Image (cartoon, rainbow, N blue to C red):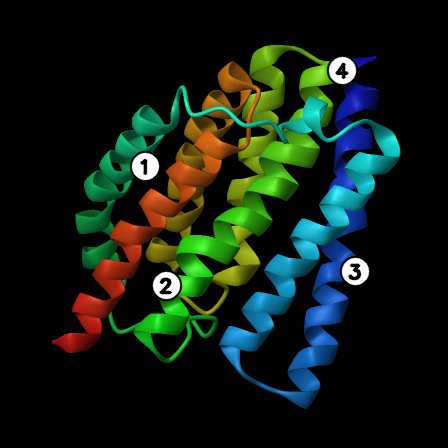
């Protein structure tokens, strides 16, 4: 029975992921701008996830509730995780720069600190983990969602050095575990939004520092 629920969660994930990538692909044909493509992808993640959630349940049940109880802890954990992993990433990155990074600091802030956490956390911790929390166990929901979240970073970093790509997948998995835990214990998406944004803040500062050298 649990396997059926995991398969259902994968189907829900693909139901959002595939149309989002198709839409972003069509946009890229007209405007090959990483920022525009990123905005399109994350907006699609958010809107399609909300639409699916509305069809299969209710928004409150899937994390759309106001709760600040775990926000300070989530912010600290996000900073800590990224601060620990950033030096390793710096050693592995070589001269690689992801092609999805915007070309200005302002655009990077909008995409990495606001839109990416909003879109990705709504899809992964909202829709996918929310569904699994309703139909499976606490840790199955957290770990399974974190695995998917980690693996989806493989195509995103397909042109990266192999060691760096492997590290990014593991790093995303750990971030997914932490975000998933805060989502589960708080019944709210606000803590995982906060954690994701805090982790991206450290990563963004790292990229800007590398590019300034």
For the C terminus, the quadrant is bottom left
Residue beneath disc 4: 135
Q: Which comes sooner in the sequence, label 4 or label 3? A: 3
Coordinates of residue 14 in the picture (x, y in percent): 77, 47
> Residue at point 58% right, 86% down?
32
* Residue that protrudes farthest toward the left in the picture: 213
* Disc 4, SS: helix
Q: Is residue 55 above or below residue 87?
A: above
Residue 20's tag is: none
* Residue that protrudes farthest toward the front in the picture: 66
| Separation of residues labelled 4 and 1 (CA atoms) | 28 Å
Residue 109's tag is: 2
| Separation of residues labelled 4 and 3 (CA atoms) | 25 Å
73 sits left or right of 20 in the view: left
| Separation of residues labelled 1 and 3 (CA atoms) | 29 Å
Coordinates of residue 12 in the picture (x, y in percent): 79, 39
Q: Is residue 211 above or below residue 112?
A: below
Mark 3, other Cα within 10 Å: few <14 / some 14–19 / many ≥20 = some
Mark 1, other Cα within 10 Å: few <14 / some 14–19 / many ≥20 = many
Residue beneath disc 1: 78
For the N terminus, the quadrant is top right
| Separation of residues labelled 1 and 2 (CA atoms) | 16 Å
> Residue at point 80% right, 30% down?
7
Q: Is residue 3 above or below residue 176?
A: above
Residue beneath disc 3: 19
Coordinates of residue 194 in the picture (x, y in percent): 40, 38
Residue contact between numbered discs 1 and 3, judged by CB atoms under 8 Å: no
Q: Which comes sooner in the sequence, label 1 or label 2? A: 1
Residue contact between numbered discs 2 and 4, judged by CB atoms under 8 Å: no
Can the viewer see residue 170?
no
């Amino acid at each position: 029975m649990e396997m059926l629920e995991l398969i259902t969660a994968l189907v829900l994930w693909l139901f959002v992921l595939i149309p989002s990538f198709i839409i972003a692909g069509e946009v890229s044909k007209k405007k090959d701008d990483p920022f525009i493509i990123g905005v399109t992808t994350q907006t699609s993640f958010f809107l399609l996830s909300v639409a699916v959630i509305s069809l299969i349940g209710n928004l409150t049940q899937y994390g759309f509730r106001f709760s600040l109880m775990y926000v300070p802890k989530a912010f600290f954990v996000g900073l800590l995780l990224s601060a620990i992993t950033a030096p390793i990433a710096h050693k592995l990155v070589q001269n690689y720069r992801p092609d999805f990074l915007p070309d200005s600091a302002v655009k990077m802030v909008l995409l990495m600190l606001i839109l990416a956490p909003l879109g990705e956390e709504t899809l992964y911790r909202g829709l996918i983990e929310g569904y699994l929390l309703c139909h499976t166990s606490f840790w199955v929901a957290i770990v399974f969602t974190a695995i998917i979240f980690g693996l989806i970073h493989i195509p995103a970093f397909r042109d990266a050095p192999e060691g760096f790509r492997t590290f990014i997948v593991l790093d995303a998995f750990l971030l997914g575990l932490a975000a998933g835990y805060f989502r589960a214990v708080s019944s709210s998406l606000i803590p995982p939004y906060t954690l994701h944004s805090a982790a991206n803040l450290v990563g963004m500062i790292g990229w800007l520092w590398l590019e300034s050298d």
